[in-house]
Image (cartoon, rainbow, N blue to C red):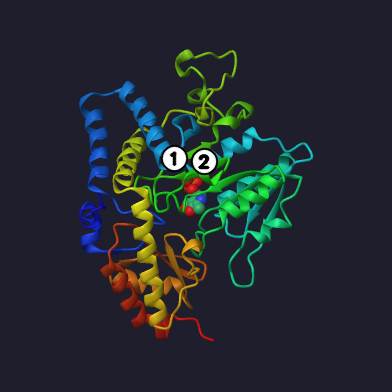
Amino acid sequence: MATNFEALRRRFPVLERKTYLNSGSYCALADSVRDAINAYMDDRLLVGANWDVWVMKNEAVRALMAQVLHAQPDEIAVTASASAGLNALASALRFDGPRNKVVISDFEFPTNAQIWHAQELRGARVVHVARSPDGYIPAESFASVIDEQTQLVAVTHVCFRNGARLDIPGIVRLARAKGARVLLDCYQSVGSIDIDARELDVDFAVGGMLKYLLGTAGIGFLYVRGELIPELTPTNTGWFAQEQITAMDITANRPSPTARRFEAGTPAVVNCYAAQAGLEIILEAGLGAIEGRVRSLTRRCLDGLKGIGWPAVTPSDDSRRGAMVAVASRDTAQLFSRLMEQDIVTSFRDANLRATIHFYNSEADIDRFVAAMRDHRARFQPQG
Ligand SMILES: Cc1ncc(COP(=O)(O)O)c(C=O)c1O
């Protein structure tokens, strides 16, 4: 059955008041996510400590997240953030041998660079792959950098600055040829692009729930390919990472045989409620349908901006962009504020204004944004 995007849109009250093009920072809140948070509050008020239910909420999030990535629940750690997942993974890797190189790209979100640079204290060498003169980073640019000393290629799926989407299958092929592993930072894509972790053949993937997964801040995930789990023992750990959480054994570290070994302490219970409700909407809408809808809305936005003579910096090729349309501006902060005054919610990074688009946006949202940009063009388009 075709997804009814109009009906789904009605579940996000902010969309009646605002042209909300900011899902790449923080999603619109759905009625059912609010209800889930309220259900937690009711539990606290009326039951007190409903511990067993709460622990199961973490498991519900794990199972739903596995569905989103076409993975197994045992391959998912539910973490406090993408950064927490990266740190747990980094702590399980060793950089004291000849394979000590980590390859990242110029498109990384800071956390997926800083955490690898932090491993320099432990012997890691971090090498950056630069963007080409046209602003993109084709897979070929990784070819001369990934070598026999490369342990990990840690790359973003979609760049948070400009919406460019990397050629992950091409990068994975290069990594495999040299025996390197691949980590995908899919925070800017998961929930808007159908990601099959097995088919993409990545070893690890990190992200979180507050953007296209429709949940909240303070909860994320780490996917670890099942076959790798037994050989990776994080030193960044805690009692919820143990094989038996309730064993309360203080004599040894006995990590869970599953990806739960990358977790740490008490789960963020209220965030699990919100994340579960958000993930349920994503799965109800269907990731294939969402991806198609987002592709057509971003296409409309790109074409509209071209039509007003202010083309986006985001790649136009469908396979090279995510759910974002970024536009260079002379003064992004001012442009952002002018749009905000018109109830058009965007965001900005560096010299780019970002319209980040989800399935719940409409054609009318896009047209309203483009019309406003036409009015602001003389003042804010870069000169020359
Ligand atoms: C691509 C990407 N990676 C990582 C992060 C950071 O995630 P966290 O704050 O959960 O560590 C973000 C947040 O905006 C992001 O866009």
Give the residue at mark 2: 198
Type of residue at label 1?
His
Q: Is mark 2 within 8 Å of ligand 1?
A: no
Question: Which residue is rendered at x = 37% and y = 60% of the image?
Answer: 294
In this rendered view, identify the residue nearer to me: 379 or 160. Answer: 160
Quadrant of res 378: bottom left
Q: Is residue 303 above or below residue 136?
A: below
- The local secondary structure at tag 1 comes to loop
In this rendered view, identify the residue nearer to me: 102 or 269. Answer: 102
Question: Which residue is rendered at x = 57% and y = 55% of the image?
Answer: 108
Q: Do callouts 1 and 2 mark residues in contact (Cβ within 8 Å)? A: yes
Give the residue at mark 1: 70
Q: Position of residue 233 (x, y in %)?
A: 62, 28
Type of residue at label 2?
Arg
Q: Position of residue 53 (x, y in %)?
A: 31, 24
Of mark 1 and mark 2, the one earlier in the sequence is 1
Disc 1 versus disc 2: distance between alpha carbons? 7 Å
Image quadrant containing the C terminus: bottom right
Residue 133 visible, this angle: yes
- The local secondary structure at tag 2 comes to helix
Q: Position of residue 27 (x, y in %)?
A: 35, 53
Decide if residue 211 is on the left or right side of residue 159. left
Q: Is residue 125 above or below residue 341?
A: above
Quadrant of res 273: top left
Quadrant of res 138: bottom right
Decide if residue 78 is on the left or right side of residue 113. left
Q: Position of residue 330 (x, y in %)?
A: 48, 78
Disc 2: CA contacts within 10 A as few (<14), some (14-19) or many (>=20): few
Residue 268 visible, this angle: no
In this rendered view, identify the residue nearer to me: 191 or 356. Answer: 191
Label drawn at residue 300: none
